[in-house]
Image (cartoon, coloured by chain):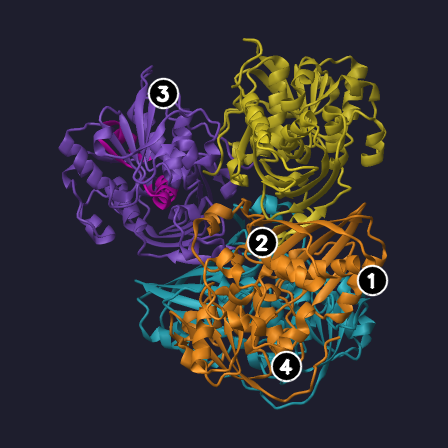
Chain colours: A orange, B yellow, C purple, D cyan
């Protein structure tokens, strides 16, 4: 199922900025097992020292690299750098790299390169993009749908966790609708997410004292991931249906489950199933369950997205599940790296589920 | 806001069957503080003895009543009996009470009397109803919408927890739509529930080993609560829109949060808000939050239903929150009792939220 | 079991400072149901406005009082004020009250008045006590052991949650040992606590992202509650055995369970049980389970302390359980108020367990 | 640190019985990544079919083996079989293997071979051992202390999770005490465990409805793991101190944290630290933290045991942490297999922590 595009013995030099955040740490974990890494540089904007001092659960692991204070100059000579930073940092770092003439591939796990339309950054995140001319050379790193673009890109914008779970679950259905000339009337995405999606911040609504035995709607139709989903669907399928969205924080650490309600202008035919089965065959990390519904456990710790589907009159109802830190962030980032450098797509990503 | 229909000094004799289940125990807790109870009889089909031996957290409480083995004869002389049993038991008990000529008011917390249409019991629960002739004398105990029927009823069918959260949240909107001749096109109810809704059973998918850090879709469009919701909406508003439903188990003990997506044939006007505000004024236990969204904590331990609302194009989006064991079960049962016997509607129900 | 020391129709005027913290909010909840309160003033050092805006889960409750910005002058005229503040604030407030000649009874839920020995404040909390001369007029508000002192006090120092669970569980055993001239060799207290004991702060180690599926030792032999326990045991029994202590944060909101290992210089006799039974009879809120072990649920939401005991050779092993926010804080504070003003000791404290 | 005893290219044939239980599934997960496995046979006493149908989170993994109905004959030809069964099954299976003349190495994850003294099985587990003559050829599979015995054994009895966490944490201290002729007076083990230690059973006290926001003492001094600990300490150090034990279920899925209080007849010297440091150097999976205390996260998902220590007068206080399903079960079982077959001790066990 998974094939290397070209057989390669090449090994690469890799850097990670932001090794103490959740996505930086997961990226590190994955790369420690990756067989194509020649060297690994770890950067932080805050902490320096042995990685085992910063992440005590890595004690006794044979990681010799120190965490270094980041500066753009240190990226020189690396083949790829993962930017695991908060919004409004990566685009400035890239501007500096350009200025310094450093050619290292950037895989950005923040939102700073996700939109093609540079106006969106101002509108949604409130900043003026520092290198808008690079947006054309940026691939949206959702490999199942942008594999070729990823291969050509100079910058890879790793998608948000909600867009990953949404766009991949919808793609076979939207393709089916387009080919069959069926109109998609409405899409409602009701997302439930563990708290690590909000990062390693100490905020009251992320405390166990607030969340244990609780449930909270925390994001809404205007969530910044909605325009991201719409821009990509438009790009892929020519137009996007109206998308309604809500996100609820559940009392759990990680995992996203989205219930997606799609209304068509007619009953979906059985043929729709074939589109999902084909997408499953073409994409190692996509798994279609048909009438069963996957739970979060079925993906926790892995790079899989698992999707169940049911039909009810004019509706197709999807349940899409990912580990927000892996397929929704670090795993997908490494998957992008594998594609870009011609490694096996699941190199380093043969991760096993935590909970059987 | 809350008024007694007639001032009364009357006290009543009450029985509870099924005191060890979650809803029986909550009913007991509420009635222990109720100022209109003359005597309380506790029944079980399984256990007998001091209630403190059966429910150790009640040790040192001054409850003198023993839990007795249930038989229909023992209901004689009581003013009201709460049946906190599993499905397909209460209707047989009522048949026996009729046979014995016992006139005690029955408040049934099981589904056995929720439908007017007797065919539904066979179709949905798989049993032949033992006293179909009594369905006409049964009130659907959702007081905010059936207060007058409750006053006249011989049997009160306490609604399911999902229907309570759904129908009450929708009622002002459906009234608005009807009066304004706006068509309701679709209703999607995405429910998230703590595990006590499934009762005190030891099932694998209710273990902490399965549910911690997990989320599971466990019920679907064909959930037995959907026909209950539709029958009542039809009864109240003449017709029911199509209702799509999913229920997810969250890793928490109690509480329901429903996100409800309602599509109209036009944008809802601001006037809609007034319908919710009026419903709030008329009903002590209904609380409209408008653009804020209540979390589960805002109701845990109380008999309130709290509802937030947002508009987005032709959609009104509702967030409805209840404590499934109180407004979704035992609290509502006592509210029905209060109405029936002319007590203050919130007598015994001035419960405080567990979590501030 | 519970008797009013003197029958009284008196009602009192009460203030609470710190109504947004966990202990302030619980105190408010309890006092809202208390039948001897004439008026309630709510203070905050930060927020002002309707209490329902500050604590949304109180919406629709008929609380007319506004939360006011605190100043010492506003205490004038109150019969009692509950100080639910962080350490190193209450003693300064009291100094100001003295300066202003305000005679209101202070019940301090912070540690600022817990030690008789004024040096301890400097040594343990790092501050110079502002009114050391008042320490003699301060009662340690553990009513089961200091009921008479509470009646006479001008200030009541509400005990810490761990000392409450520890000292009360140990008291009958220490009395037994003293009377039988048995030597207590060692006491090891292994405490497990929900996170609300740490207050409503947003700290990383209190986030669900850190604590879900985790367990953490967070305090040790040198915990500031150990000298509090020792000073009181010394005061009550003439001397204190060596006390070893650890505290673990569990992934739960509230509740403390302490496993206490007591080594004696001989096997405890059966007569020891009688000491626990007597203490249970004399104290409404103390409940001895003998060979069973209470779980946290048996006290959650209530003012009870429940204690189990087993003997193993020279050891008596205790399991002591409380709700840290009630018997460990606000409930005990109200219990102290009841005693001081001659109300029934459990007035307002007939709270029911949350979980049956 | 980790060295292969003899370099080997040999690959082995392996079977697992009980692949649906927690320990069987974890063993499978580990062996799927093990580079010395030639073939893997999966057995169940109940279910047959594709492993992906039995464990849906393994869908899309390339596991070709089917789960077969177990019979002793099918063990023939395997190099090793892991018995992941409940108590009182493995010893009967071994009796049958002996009868059939099958020489396959047995690694038993149940308690059926843990005691040398055959009387203990009757006394503690209530069964007559079927092959008591094999107890002499059985190694207690705690490799850090019985590495040589494991190499020679015909049967390997994998230790219980509590004994693993206890004996390993105590070993350097007991060695120190023995060499320095210091007397160990008492050992108190206060264990806190996630629910998977109790297996994949649906019991009321393992439901989330019971355990969320709760804590429960569930095992005591007479717990069957105590004689296991004592027998091994006696075997290793000539005599065992008195051991007191309690086990508490925490609202979490996996992980054990033990707080261990050891009283000596004198203050421990600084030299004690060296014993722990040496043990850390000699044993890859043992990690000494000295004055810090490890949390459960520091081991979740890994085969490490991490131990912190503090001194207080005559006490040494230890905090010992493991993942109960890995170092406490399946990881240790594979570690034993590695030793027995001359593989690198951490082959297949370079597992990364789940939570960084």
Labelled pair 4, 1 in contact (Cβ < 8 Å): no
- Residue B265 magenta-drawn? no
- Which stretch appears magenta? C145-174
Chain under numbered label 3: C
The reply to whether residue D284 is visible in this rendering is yes
- Quadrant where the C terminus of chain A sits is bottom right
Residue position for label 3 = C36
Q: Could you give the CA–CA distance between mark 4 and mark 3, rounded to whole angstroms?
A: 75 Å
The reply to whether residue A322 is visible in this rendering is no
Residue occupying the point 47% across, 63% down: A87
Mark 4 vs mark 3, foreground winner is 3
Labelled pair 1, 3 in contact (Cβ < 8 Å): no
Relative height, residue C332 to residue A129 (above, below): above
Residue position for label 4 = D340
Give left or right: position of C32 versus D139: left
Mark 2 vs mark 4, foreground winner is 2
Of helix, strand and loop, which one carries label 4?
Answer: helix
Give the number of callouts.
4
């Amino acid at each position: 199922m998974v094939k290397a595009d070209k057989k390669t013995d090449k090994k690469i030099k890799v850097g990670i900025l932001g090794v103490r955040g959740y996505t930086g740490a997961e990226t590190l974990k994955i790369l420690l097992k990756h067989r194509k890494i020649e060297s690994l540089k770890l950067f932080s904007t805050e902490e320096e020292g042995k990685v085992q001092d910063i992440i005590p659960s890595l004690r006794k692991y044979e990681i010799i690299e120190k965490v270094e204070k980041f500066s753009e100059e240190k990226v020189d000579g690396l083949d790829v750098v993962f930017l695991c930073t908060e919004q409004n940092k990566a685009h400035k770092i890239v501007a500096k790299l350009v200025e310094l003439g450093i050619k290292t591939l950037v895989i950005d796990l923040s939102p700073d390169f996700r939109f093609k339309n540079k106006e969106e950054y101002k509108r949604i995140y409130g900043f003026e993009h520092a290198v808008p001319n690079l947006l054309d050379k940026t691939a949206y790193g959702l490999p199942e749908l942008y594999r070729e673009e990823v291969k050509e890109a100079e910058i890879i914008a790793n998608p948000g966790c909600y867009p990953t779970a949404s766009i991949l679950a919808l793609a076979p259905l939207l393709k089916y609708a387009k080919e069959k000339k069926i109109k998609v009337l409405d899409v409602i995405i009701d997302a439930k997410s563990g708290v690590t999606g909000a990062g390693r911040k100490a905020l009251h609504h992320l405390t166990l004292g607030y969340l244990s035995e609780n449930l909270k709607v925390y994001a809404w139709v205007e969530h910044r991931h909605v325009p991201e989903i719409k821009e990509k669907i438009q790009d892929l399928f020519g137009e996007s249906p109206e998308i309604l969205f809500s996100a609820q924080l559940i009392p759990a650490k990680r995992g996203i489950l989205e219930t997606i309600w799609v209304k068509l202008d007619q009953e979906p035919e059985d043929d729709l199933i074939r589109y999902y089965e084909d997408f499953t065959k073409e994409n190692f990390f996509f798994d279609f369950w048909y009438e069963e519904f996957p739970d979060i456990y079925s993906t926790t710790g892995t790079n899989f997205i698992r999707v169940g589907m049911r039909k009810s009159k004019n509706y197709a109802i999807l349940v899409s599940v990912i580990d927000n830190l892996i397929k929704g962030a670090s795993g997908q980032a490494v998957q992008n790296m594998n594609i870009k450098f011609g490694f096996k797509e699941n190199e380093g990503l043969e991760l096993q589920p935590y909970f059987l």
